[in-house]
Image (spheres, coloured by chain):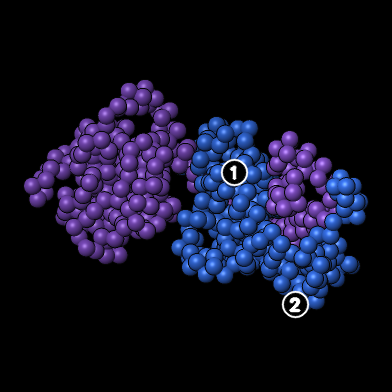
Amino acid sequence: MSRKPKKIAAERQLFEVEARPHLDALYSMALRLTRSPVDAEDLVQDTLVRAYRFYDRFEAGTNFKAWLLRIQMNSFVNRYRRATRERQVFEGPMAVPVGEGVMSRASMRGLTDPVGDAQRRLIAREINRAFEELSDEARAMVLLADVEELSYKEIADVVGCPIGTVMSRLHRARKQLQGSLQQHAMQLGIIEEGDDDVEDPIPLEAFRSRKEMKS
Amino acid sequence: MSCKLVRRHLGAFVDGEIDPATQIEFERHLEACPGCQEHLAFESSLRQQTRDSIGGIHAPEHLWGRAIHRLDEIDEAKAEHTSLIQVRPMRWRQSWPIAAAASAILIIGGVVGLPQSTDHQSAGMLQDVMNFHSQPLPSDVRAEGPQDVVRYFQGKTPFPVKPAHFEEPSMKFVGARYINVGARPAAALYYNHGGRRVTLLVFQSPEIMRHARRTHVGGRELYYHNVGGNVVTIRQHGGVNYAFFGDLDRPALFQLAATARVAY
């Protein structure tokens, strides 16, 4: 094998320096998408190989993590779409219906301020379970937005859809997560179902000022 | 601004994805509305809890090393191409054709050694072709359908790529990937012929035809190179080159090359 020219070595070094900090994000995403540590490792390896091969196509100044995640997302879709398609078909219609009032007020309070570490851990477990029940697409949305904290524009680039679609998909995914979380949490007695969700009580002062305006 | 509207877009508000003008209205509403404040507190808290619960996964220690090791293959391939270009920079550039004549190469058997009767450019290219067969890289796109393959190569190669059709029913398309042949974009298409591997490379290189010999198989014109006791067969088509090579005997491979439908 011929000796490596300096240019290649320099490019390789730059790539490693840039890519290394994102390994956890890539693996985390891969594991959440494939649900298998073995598949996740394969997916990350493929992603890094592809990224390195097309490194010259990366636009300097844009988000490198988002670029890597996009490559990984494409690899995932290409490799695993077939296997996961069936699951998605079942998940679609079975998914919790999405409405504005998915979460009752009592549930919200119970989940907003968990009391003590034990409850915090319990809720964390339930969030995990609710998350696992989401479709591939919804899991990707929640991961990219809530865990990786990418902007909507970056998410749009990663999954290859318009920003408006990101907004609605993300909204739907979060509502599904909340709905499923509420069910689990209620079954476990972490939260109690309240009946105060029917209507928001009008704050007294607002009520008064409204009255004053009428009279 | 209504509570319903605020709550519907609370997620985007927490994400900081609401335009500045609307954001001010949001804030004004939230200031005056305890109900929506509660929703906001919940939304923010759940966001944090979600991050804590499903984030924080660390990659296994060995993963980076394993992944990086695979980049060596690419470096080696790049280094080879670079050294080829360094040897004959002018001739490479001169030989960039606008409308390339197409050719198809067939290499028979386990290939060893460099071709003897060809010039350096063809030799380098044939060496690449041989390497890609003897040390195949994994497929990037699987044999799901010709359309998947066509789509995969769009934007990667400057010419359209389709899997070739063969009359032999035992020729099965296995998968494909993007590669470089002599620093030029190329498509590698993998086939299986009754348990023997056949690789088809698609690239643009009219110089590969320069010293090729000519023959006829089944009324079709074939070109070929003698390569270290084996034979590289070349067929010409307009626009794009197709290079086949496989672990088959000479007549079988000639037959494949002659009957393959590469442009359809």
Residue type at mark 1 is Ile
Determine the chain carrying the residue at label 2. A
Q: In the image shown, does B213 or B21 lie closer to the viewer?
A: B21
Residue under label 1: A163
Whether residue A120 appears in this view of the structure is: no
Instruction: Return the x and y of residue B259 as percentages of the image width and height.
Output: 17, 52
Q: Is residue A10 above or below residue B248?
A: above
- For mark 2, what is the residue? A187
Q: Quadrant of residue B116?
A: top left
Q: Position of residue B186 (x, y in %)?
A: 36, 41
Q: Secondary structure at mark 2?
A: helix
Image coordinates of residue B34 in percent, x first then y, are: 86, 53
Q: Which chain is blue?
A: A
Residue B121: image location, x then y, percent: 32, 32
* Front residue of B230 and B44: B44
Residue A214 lies left or right of residue A27; in this view the side is right
Q: Residue at x 30, y 27 (%)?
A: B97
Q: Residue furthest left?
A: B219
